[in-house]
Image: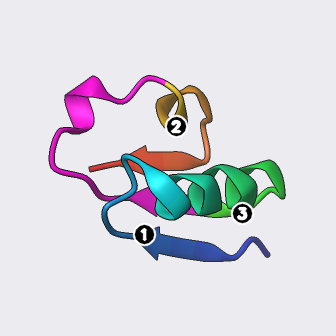
Amino acid sequence: MNNTIFITCASSGIDKVTAELFQQKGGNVIANMRTPEQEAELTKSENTLVT
């Protein structure tokens, strides 16, 4: 069973680094940000939902 984490303000800083680390470890990530259409890195993983 994979863990899921919800991160707000995930477009930069420690929140983005946390989202990247969690997805690298195989967890599911829900990354919330103001401009999700501008995000290129987090959307590459199939276990990450950018909203």
* Pair 1/3: label in front: 1
**Quarter assignment of residue 4:** bottom right
Q: Position of residue 13 (x, y in %)?
A: 47, 55
Near-viewer residue (37 or 18): 18
Q: Earlier in the sequence, mark 2 or mark 1?
A: 1
Span colored in magenta: 29-40
Q: Residue at x 51, y 53 (%)?
A: 16
Mark 3 residue type: Gly
Residue denoted by label 3: 27
- Magenta stretch containing residue 20, yes or no? no
Q: Is residue 38 above or below residue 13?
A: above
Question: How many numbered circles does the render carry?
Answer: 3
Q: Residue at x 44, y 23 (%)?
A: 40
C-alpha separation, residue under disc 2 versus residue under disc 1: 12 Å
| Helix, strand or loop at mark 2 | helix
C-alpha separation, residue under disc 1 versus residue under disc 3: 12 Å
Near-viewer residue (33 or 50): 33
Residue denoted by label 1: 7
**Quarter assignment of residue 31:** bottom left
| Helix, strand or loop at mark 1 | strand
Task: Tell me, for residue 35, which label it has, or none.
Answer: none
